[in-house]
Image: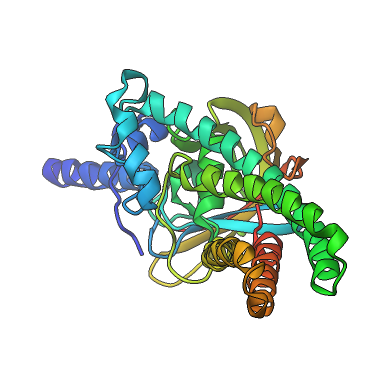
């Protein structure tokens, strides 16, 4: 009888432990993208990175995302024009600050949506941002997190690049679509 | 798809973990560059003999600033050249139609246009290279470069044919055609280029 209680205790403990244990899930690089959108009085363009390094912390079934972090190389963005991408790396001082980084400070998981607050480090400057994201459940325990936000590049000490003396809009729109 | 998962016995800093997994693979020079750029700024380029232009991250940052300055001046002199070419087209047309009083103006304007044109070209040809290689497929910068080959060749032809016209008037239409090709392709190269 005593052995049965001990066994039950062990099994219950293991069950409770497994229920409360947090797991890390890495982003699927084959499907995840981060895209920026910029505009100049003469035209608009976008650049996409397919080299998204991200990790979330959640329960095993990914019902509750608790934390997330994202790391993207500035050099990984492709706007379809190598001169423009090189200019972007120059303006963003990619040799000195090679990554755009984001880490959550709080995540409210509402099931199908997320309220996210965190710190965005861009051009070596870290600022607090907040945004909403959509959370979509797929088969095989895959979740997709998509959303977007805007930043003012001057707040990150980035001088808007200019063409013919006319600077670009200082707003950069960022959209993400990440699969875990 | 779950690529990686494990129980968190002790949660660390997620961002630091991601950073530790990265390798510093950023190349300082593109694989391909113009031969004029390679001659000056390549791995063994002439400029690499100077300590202040040794191939390091810090020096590449400086080079990119030099490149930007050169390309901004390239834009300004390019537009000036286009304006001079437009004026030259008008003056040339007058001379072509028998108004020989403008012949000297045409010659003088040709000299100034040449100075601006070849300065513009040199600024692009000898600027430090960009950070990355060209992407695959169409891009406005590729069209800009293709058009540059056309207007550069046309400018050479215009300059060769110009002095020959005096002795051989039959060459006039060819001189005019070369000049108009240079003007047209330079105009197109400017329209196509985007930031």
Q: Of all residues shown, which one is farthest toward the top?
A: B51
| Rendered location of residue A175, percent (x, y) | 62, 54
| Rendered location of residue B136, percent (x, y) | 43, 67
| Rendered location of residue B21, percent (x, y) | 29, 39
Using the rendered view, name the quadrant where residue B141 is placed.
bottom right
Using the rendered view, name the quadrant where residue A31 is placed.
bottom left
Evaluate whether residue A61 shows in this view: yes
Q: Up-down: is B36 above or below B61?
A: below
Residue in the picture at 47% in, 71% down: B137
Residue in the picture at 29% in, 43% down: B7
Asked whether, in this view, residue A45 is left or right of residue B127, the answer is: right
Asked whether, in this view, residue A167 is left or right of residue B50, the answer is: right
| Rendered location of residue B49, percent (x, y) | 27, 26
Q: Up-down: is A63 above or below B41?
A: below
Q: Up-down: is B5 above or below B23?
A: below
Q: Up-down: is B3 above or below B137?
A: above
Q: Of all residues shown, which one is farthest toward the front?
A: B167
């Amino acid at each position: 009888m005593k052995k049965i209680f001990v066994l039950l205790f062990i099994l219950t403990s293991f069950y409770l432990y497994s229920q409360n244990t947090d797991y890390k899930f890495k982003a699927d690089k084959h499907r995840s993208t981060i895209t920026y959108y910029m505009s100049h009085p003469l035209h608009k363009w976008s650049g996409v990175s397919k080299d998204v390094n991200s990790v979330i912390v959640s329960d095993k079934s990914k019902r509750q995302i608790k934390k997330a972090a994202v790391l993207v190389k500035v050099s990984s963005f492709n706007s379809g024009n190598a001169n423009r991408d090189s200019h972007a790396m120059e303006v963003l001082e990619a040799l000195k600050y090679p990554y755009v980084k984001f880490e959550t400070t709080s995540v409210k998981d509402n099931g199908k949506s997320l309220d996210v607050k965190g710190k965005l480090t861009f051009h070596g400057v870290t600022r607090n941002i907040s945004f909403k994201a959509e959370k979509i459940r797929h088969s095989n325990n895959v979740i997709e997190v998509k959303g977007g936000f805007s930043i003012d590049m001057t707040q990150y000490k980035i001088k808007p690049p200019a063409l013919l003396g006319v600077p670009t809009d200082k707003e950069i729109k960022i959209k993400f679509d990440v699969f875990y | 798809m779950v690529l990686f998962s494990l129980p968190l016995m002790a949660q660390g800093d997620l961002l630091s973990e991601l950073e530790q997994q990265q390798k510093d693979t950023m190349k300082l020079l593109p694989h391909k560059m113009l031969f004029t750029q390679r001659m000056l700024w390549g791995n063994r380029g002439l400029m690499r003999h100077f300590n202040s232009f040794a191939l390091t991250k810090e020096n590449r940052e400086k080079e990119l600033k030099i490149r930007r300055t050169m390309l901004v001046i390239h834009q300004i002199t390019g537009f000036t050249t286009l304006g001079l070419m437009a004026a030259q087209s008008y003056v040339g047309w007058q001379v072509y139609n028998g108004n020989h009083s403008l012949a000297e103006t045409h010659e003088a304007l040709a000299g100034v246009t040449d100075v601006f044109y070849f300065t513009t070209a040199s600024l692009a040809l000898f600027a430090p290279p960009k950070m990355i290689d060209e992407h695959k497929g169409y891009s406005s910068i590729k069209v800009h470069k293709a058009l540059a080959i056309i207007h550069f060749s046309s400018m050479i032809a215009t300059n060769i044919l110009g002095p020959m016209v005096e002795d051989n008037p039959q060459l006039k239409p060819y001189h005019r055609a070369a000049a108009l090709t240079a003007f047209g392709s330079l105009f197109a190269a400017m329209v196509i280029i985007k930031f």
